[in-house]
Image (tube, rainbow, N blue to C red):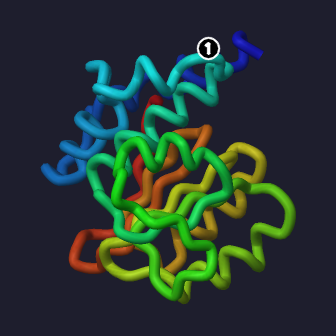
Amino acid sequence: MRLMHILVWLSRINHCRGFGIQSPTDYWFVRYVINEHWPYYQYAMLRKNDKWLVKKLGCLYFRIANWRQPKTVICDGSQIYLQAGCKTAVLNEKADQADLILIKLEGDYHSRMLSIYNKVNERTVLILEGIWKDKSFWQEIAEDGRTGVTFDLYYCGIVLFDKKRHKKNYIINF
């Protein structure tokens, strides 16, 4: 399993740390949210006994929640990381609108995604965990007219819905 992670990392070596990203906003997001290497204040408490990938993704979710400061969160797990990043966030699966949505690609995620489109606004950040399981589904999301800028991190995908920004799908070495 560790060998696979190394091969994925090596195959994406040309997409490290925001190289080639022309948008200053997207470059900043990649450098200081996605690939931030400095320890945050909650890392020691959060990283206790999790597996390598759970820790890596959990810390990413923490940084995204800390950056976005969502009011409402819909998520399929990793609540502890999201709530550590924004203590005021309310977890509400039945919410009409959400600022941060985390979906794992398990079960009937196709129909779940259709209902998610009704809950997004221009500030919403959608995280799809496990996009390597269904690359064609991720391509559909990235090409969909309802989405904006997307970031393919192999282990998860991040979708922003801000229509004022130029639509682009970035491959990031995470």
Position of 55 with respect to 83 (left or right) is right
User: Could you tell me the amino acid type at mark 1?
Assistant: Ile
Residue bearing mark 1: 6
Q: Residue at x 56, y 67 (%)?
A: 74
Q: Residue at x 61, y 38 (%)?
A: 155
Give the crowd class for mark 1: few <14, some 14-19, many >=20 residues within 10 Å. few
Give percent across and percent down for residue 14: 40, 26
Q: Quadrant of residue 141?
A: bottom right
Q: Is residue 118 above or below residue 130?
A: below
Label 1 sits on a secondary structure element that is helix
Give percent across and percent down for residue 37: 31, 20
Name the quadrant of the N terminus: top right
Q: Residue at x 45, y 66 (%)?
A: 90
Position of 15 with respect to 127 (left or right) is left
Give percent across and percent down for residue 20: 26, 38
Q: In the displayed orientation, state which residue is furthest to the right.
A: 107
Q: In the displayed orientation, state which residue is furthest to the top.
A: 3
Q: Which residue is at the front of the view, 84 or 21?
A: 84
Q: Which residue is at the front of the view, 49 or 148?
A: 49
Q: Residue at x 18, y 48 (%)?
A: 22
Numbered marks: total = 1
Q: Is residue 106 above or below residue 34?
A: below
Give percent across and percent down for residue 94: 62, 81
Q: Which residue is at the front of the view, 46 or 7?
A: 46
Position of 26 with respect to 89 (left or right) is left
